[in-house]
Image (cartoon, rainbow, N blue to C red):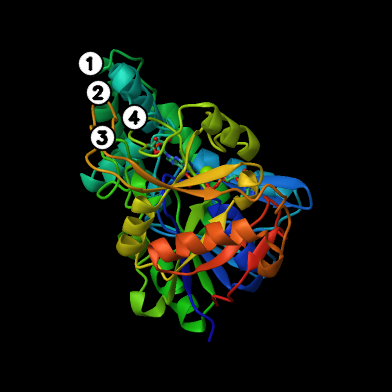
Amino acid sequence: MKNNIFLIGTHWGDEGKGKVVDVLSAEATACVRFQGGHNAGHTLVINDKKFILHLIPSGILRDDVKSVIGNGVVVSIDALITEIKELENNGISLDNKLYISQNCHIILPTHIAIDQAREKKLGKKSIGTTGRGIGPCYEDKTSRKGIRLLDLKNEEIFLKKLENLMEYHNFILNSYFHEDVIDMKSVADELLTKYKLISKYLIDTDNFINDLCLKGGVVFEGAQGTMLDIDHGTFPYVTSSNTTLSGLVSGTGVNMSLVNYGLGITKAYSTRVGHGPFPSELKNDIGERIGEIGGEIGATTGRTRRCGWLDTKVLKKSIRLNNLSGIALTKIDVLDNFDEISICVDYGKIDYESFAVEDLKFIKLPGWKSSTVGITNYKDLPKNAKLYIETIEELVQIPIDIISTGPARDEIIQKTNIF
Ligand code: GDP
Ligand code: IMO
Ligand code: MG
């Protein structure tokens, strides 16, 4: 039986999870999202065509792969329908391929308005959220006020719940944030209409996912990254879900004894979008150059990503927290033309007011100054690129199984078959 695998971003998101999931999906039976929402932006490049997926798992472009949105994901029905339509317009059918947990909590327009109003009020101290309503939706889930997809099955119950919740939201919007309120009736009408378009995808995913795992070949696709985890990340500059392994368990109900391999997705350098501490950040022309070559513009919000050297202190933490077995190192090609490449290996205290970091320690390695773009065999990599990869392996003590050498599906070195 094939391994069931989970993929988790090891840093602050945008490590190239979508690309690696798409590659692995060639051999997968199913692909499952377990947390986050349309704050995620996972990019796939196939035959020069770019797809950015926000909610739907990145296995969706493969004909024989089932795509499951687990109960831990928060769903904007609007964003979901937009994504379904985009895929259908590209000739990708979702029937008998897409399955969504009826227990997913729904993101309402008021969640989005509160998210944005809160950020505005925080001003310079804002988190830099994606403004998609993610935090307020998870808050309502935890405080047991939230509305789930299954609530839309019964119009009367749904309207009662929506009325209660939106009354509360509108009070906050108006009295606390001094923002406009949102009309309950138009939200209700829209949701009830749009629900009809997605109800066919709803199931109880818990058993379904466990049954898929019994057959093997399931890929669990994390969103965001370890340092954006609500408990273990750079709080309060984090997202509102557990992006780490615990989120996989609660967000699917999978029996973890069935999940055999944890793959950390690590970018060859580090990036962060939004505010918050970033110890290895390069606020200089090297950082700018990495960002330009790497095209480091957010896939969801279009914001410029901050860039820095690879942080192996964070990587080690991520390996421990997520029980990772191996790593997929992405975007190595972005470092092709640097004379020298550093790795951030340690630091002391982080000041959460100024984001200053004490005692940063780096090791420096020679660059390889030649192209790795599109290389598919490890032995064909330049000597110093191998030195870089092997130095990381030695620092973190787990293998680098996969190396991504470009955005396209076939630009990949698969050293080990992790299935
Ligand atoms: P995700 O959120 O982790 O799926 O990552 P994003 O899609 O937000 O950002 C990764 C970006 O890097 C996307 O634009 C990808 O097309 C691109 N990408 C992925 N792997 C590689 C690679 O190996 N080399 C290069 N140059 N780009 C890559
Ligand atoms: P993928 O899956 C990078 C960041 C936001 C902000 C913080 C909180 O593509 O890697 P939120 O809207 O979640 O409340 O914002 O988290 N963030 C991401 N950064 N990649 C992502 O997803 C992100 N999703 C959220 O920028 O700093
Ligand atoms: Mg992304």
Q: CA distance from mark 1 to mark 3?
A: 17 Å
Q: Nearer the viewer, residue 165 or 305?
A: 305
Question: Between tags 1 and 3, which lies in front?
Answer: 1
Compared across the picture, whether 363 is left or right of 246 comes to right
Q: Position of residue 23 (x, y in %)?
A: 64, 63
Q: Badge 2 is on which residue?
A: 172
Which residue is pictured at 53% across the width and 45% down the height? 341
Circle 2 SS class: helix
Question: Between tags 4 and 3, which lies in front?
Answer: 4
Which residue is pictured at 24% across the width and 49% down the height? 231
Pick whichever of labels 2 and 3 is earlier in the sequence: 3
Asked if the residues shown at circle 2 and circle 1 are in contact, with their CB atoms under 8 angstroms apart, the answer is yes
Q: CA distance from mark 2 to mark 4?
A: 19 Å
Pick whichever of labels 4 and 3 is earlier in the sequence: 4
What numbered label is drawn on residue 175?
1
Circle 1 SS class: helix
Q: Residues within 10 Å of mark 3 (few under 14, many from 20)?
A: few
Question: Between tags 4 and 1, which lies in front?
Answer: 4
Pick whichever of labels 2 and 4 is earlier in the sequence: 4
Circle 4 SS class: loop
Q: Badge 3 is on which residue?
A: 164
Q: Residues within 10 Å of mark 2 (few under 14, many from 20)?
A: some
Which amino acid type corresponds to the residue marked 1 in the rendered image? Answer: Ser
